[in-house]
Image: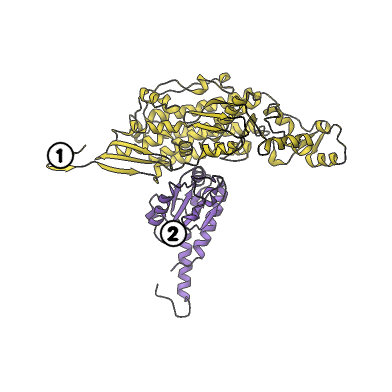
Chain colours: A yellow, B purple
Amino acid sequence: MSSVAIGRETKNMLLNVGPSHPAMHGVIRLITELEGEKVIKVEAEIGYLHRAFEKSAENSSWTQVIPYTDRLNYVSPLINNFGYCGAVEKLLGIETTERCKYIRVIMAEVSRLTDHLTCIAASAMELGAMTAFLYLMKAREYLYEIVEEVTGARLTISYGRIGGVKGDLPDGVAERLEGALGNTEKEILEVDKLLTRNRIFVDRTRDVGVLTEGDAISYGITGPMLRSTGVNYDVRKIFPYEVYDRMEFEVPRGERGDNYDRYLVRMEEMRQSIRIIRQAMRDMPGGPINVDSEGKVMTSFDLVDQAKLGHTAGLVDIISTVEPTLEGMERPYHSRVMPDNKRVVLPSKGDTYGNIEGLMNHFKLIMDYHGIRPPIGDTYHAVEGANGELGFYIVSDGKDRPYRVRVRPPCFFAMAGLHKMLEGYMVADIISTFGSINMIAGELDR
Amino acid sequence: MGIQSADGPGFFTSKLERAIGWARKYSIFVYPFVTACCGMEYMSVASGHYDIDRFGAGLPRFSPRQSDVLFVVGTVSHKIAPILRRVYDQMCEPKWVVAFGVCTCTGGFYDNYATVQGIDTILPVDVYIPGCPPRPEAVLDGLMKLQNKIENQKQFT
């Protein structure tokens, strides 16, 4: 690789980018070989955030895996949750309720929005566009408020349950969600104005980090990166799950497969996500439930007192209210989002605290070596994660904990094909290209 | 500094200590050692809504030589631990360390072969901010505790 220049031998330079580098999104090391400023060879070293997800999953019950899935792709945790739950449901052969499917679609799209917002924000910041970063973070904050209201947490939400979701949407969330979407749209438009025709941004991204269609397919790259090369592949369209087949949305595609196309695809996907959320909110079955009807509402403590006195006749039919932290988990809400399957689904909190059948059912599912027991077998279920096809391959040996949970993380394949996008470009282009890949170490290293 | 009398710190020294403490407290240059999920909350804290700039810690420095406070944000695995230690060693005195998130405090729920069970096994930690991830309010609370510590500690050693 060395060349002779004016009688003196020159050598290529080896440069480590990362692992602790601001643009390496945490933890990845690129070993680059440089000739001047030109990148000759790139090798990516991964594994700095290996947290033993798959091994931990084998030592947890089927439900206990859900919190680990939050932390796989921590920028869009809801999609991971629903992906894992969908896989287990497929193995168990149970169907979620209609309303639950809509809720999953809505929350997954909110998550996709937060993911794309973060990706564009971070990559713009790395190119020096701090304003765009601050605007997009502002938009993400609106969405986090909605996520917090629905799930109880901002980031690590554990909202999915095998068979459904944790609880129904809280009252009045529709208006607030609409408000948040409106605000997000405004911020996206603002950033669109700032970046899309910005000369500096276009110069840094146009025709940089080009990925060809053939390379993308042969490396197994999916998601916005594949679509930016012009391939029409979106799991939501090709293998529809939940209720995506009823939604009207377009799959944006690029032409050149460069950084700028990836940026444009993400921007358009955010608009399509907002469109999907609006449709799902409109079509979602199940109106408001008036739990206060007929004066039959009791607190769970009163129910327990009555049961202790032996006044058990008709107690099962009484709706009990539970404490505010368990909002959306009373029986009427619960039955809307969870299927009627006592072997898989935890009873509503009103039943757990209010009657002995519910309590027993709860403990049978919670105790070690009882719990959910899918039949012996294996299955693969894929959802469209924010970075691409997020698949869960799970194997059950009929026990209460998984025999194997294998994740197909979309980033992993992008990292395998990374050198195709970096070699032949300048050192400074590493930052721009790497930002547009949206590598998430949590799901890459697991 | 040679302005100390034989019987403890004098008038000027104690005044100077307080002035330096006050100044240091509001000019924190943070090195965010972001590895995992907590980074998302760090971004929230750093940007407009929660605005870490109000506490004088708004400007992250990505060179250990230029920073005062090492924010360890996210799970530290055994593979990244030597790098973290190296970053810490490269920082100039005076320096402080904040353990951001429960993974850095104790290992959190990653109680397994791959994860360092608390970064205090490899470096001294000044402030622990638990939570998985901690809310931005909790982070700001931790930052204020760090400011108190910076202000009240002995400035000349």
Q: Mark 2 points at which residue?
A: B95
Amino acid on which disc 1 is placed:
Val
**Residue B116 appears in the rendering:** yes
Residue A190 at x, y = what percent? 46, 34
Disc tally is 2
Query: Badge 1 local density, few (<14 within 10 Å), some, or many (20+)?
Result: few
Q: Which of marks 2 and 1 is in front?
A: 1
Amino acid on which disc 2 is placed:
Lys
**Residue A208 appears in the rendering:** no
Query: Which chain letter matches label 2?
Result: B
Q: Which of A309 and B23 is in front in this view?
A: A309
Q: Mark 1 points at which residue?
A: A4
Residue A87 at x, y = what percent? 57, 27
Kind of element beneath mark 2: loop
Residue A304 at x, y = what percent? 81, 40
Location of residue A148 (image quadrant): top right
Q: Nearer the viewer, residue B60 or A77?
A: A77
Location of residue A28 (image quadrant): top left
Q: Is residue A331 left or right of residue B128?
A: right
Kind of element beneath mark 1: strand
Task: Give the position of the N terminus of chain A as an image quadrant.
Answer: top left
User: Vertical placement of A278 versus A312: above or below?
Assistant: above
Q: Which of B85 and A363 is in front in this view?
A: A363
Residues at marks 2 and 1 on the same chain: no
